[in-house]
Image: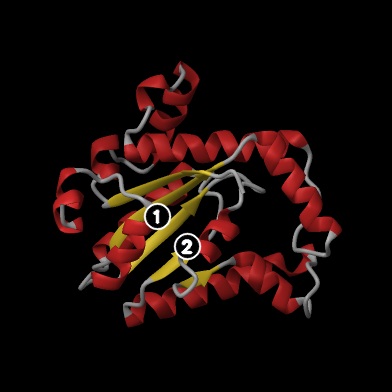
Amino acid sequence: MRLYDLLLESKGISIQELGELIETSKDPVYIVVAGSVGSGKSYIVNKHLPNVDTVDPDNFTMQLGDGVYDGKNVAKAMALVKKDIAEKLSSKTTFIQQGTSANLQATINKLEKMKKSGFTTALLFVDAPIEQAIKQIEQRVASGGHGETLDRKKVETTSNSAKLTFRALSGVDFDMATEEDVEKVNQVLEKIEKTLDNARKNLDYFVRIDNKY
């Protein structure tokens, strides 16, 4: 079966198929990443999509600190992120936007903007057990990597919110969402005057990875 046929049948594809899509697509491809802090998002991107331009706030923060992650540089880093994205949008360059996608409303807005600008859109969701994520964060900080040690609540919050973003936009396991989750989604949709069906129209493909490192 050709990849083209597969994509017509379902929006859900593998990371390998996403890579092939990037290589063969006539339109630029926009990939927004979702997953908790410590879930291994950068690891997955670097392993499977190493040649795709990536916009990562943490990288800008590190650059501003001459290789040292300093929280004081985060605001400046975000300004550089916006500038970089604007340039890629203008030049129609395929790229990956790193982040947790814990904010459903912001993720919907990003996908809508890119879709209207002629990009093929994809959501790359990297899931990992909470304990594993915490361990990775601690190891990263101990080795001098970016960021700082986060408490369990922060990791759980970003994990749950990223998962809800994925479920809401992909439809995968959304029937398993709790009443509280559904209420959160409805509140977001009311703010941006959209329905879930309309929000999903801006997402062409999605990839889910259960990361075991």
Whether 134 is drawn above or below 113: the answer is above
Say if mark 1 contacts mark 2, CB within 8 Å: yes
Up-down relation of residue 186 to residue 132 (above or below)? above
* Count of numbered badges drawn on the protein: 2
Question: Residue 67 vs residue 155: left or right?
Answer: right
x and y percent of residue 73 in the render?
74, 70
- Disc with the residue nearer the chain's start (1 vs 2): 1
Where is residue 88 drawn, in percent x and y? 40, 77
Asked whether 159 or 5 is in front, the reply is: 5
Does residue 192 appear to the left or right of 151 in the view shown? Answer: left
The kind of residue tagged 2 is His
Going 37% across and 27% down the picture, which residue do you hit? Answer: 174
The percent coordinates of residue 86 (x first, y second) are 43, 75
Give the side of residue 84 with respect to residue 137, left or right.
Answer: left
Disc number for residue 48 = 2
Quarter residue 133 falls in: top right
Whether residue 203 is visible to the viewer of this picture, yes or no, is no
Q: Left or right: where does residue 58 sit relative to residue 152?
A: left
Q: Residues within 10 Å of mark 2 (few under 14, many from 20)?
A: some
- Residue positioned 29% across, 36% down in the render: 196
Assess disc 1: are there few (<14), some (14-19) or many (≥20) residues with their C-alpha within 10 Å of its C-alpha: some
Residue 119: image location, x then y, percent: 28, 66
Q: Residue furthest front?
A: 1
Q: Which mark is residue 15?
A: 1
Res. 194 in view: yes
Element under disc 2:
helix
Residue at mark 1 to residue at mark 2: CA–CA distance: 7 Å
Amino acid type at circle 1 is Ile
Q: Nearer the viewer, residue 134 or 80?
A: 134
Using the image as rendered, state which of residue 201 and residue 105 is in the foreground. Answer: 201
Rendered view: 68 above or below 209: below
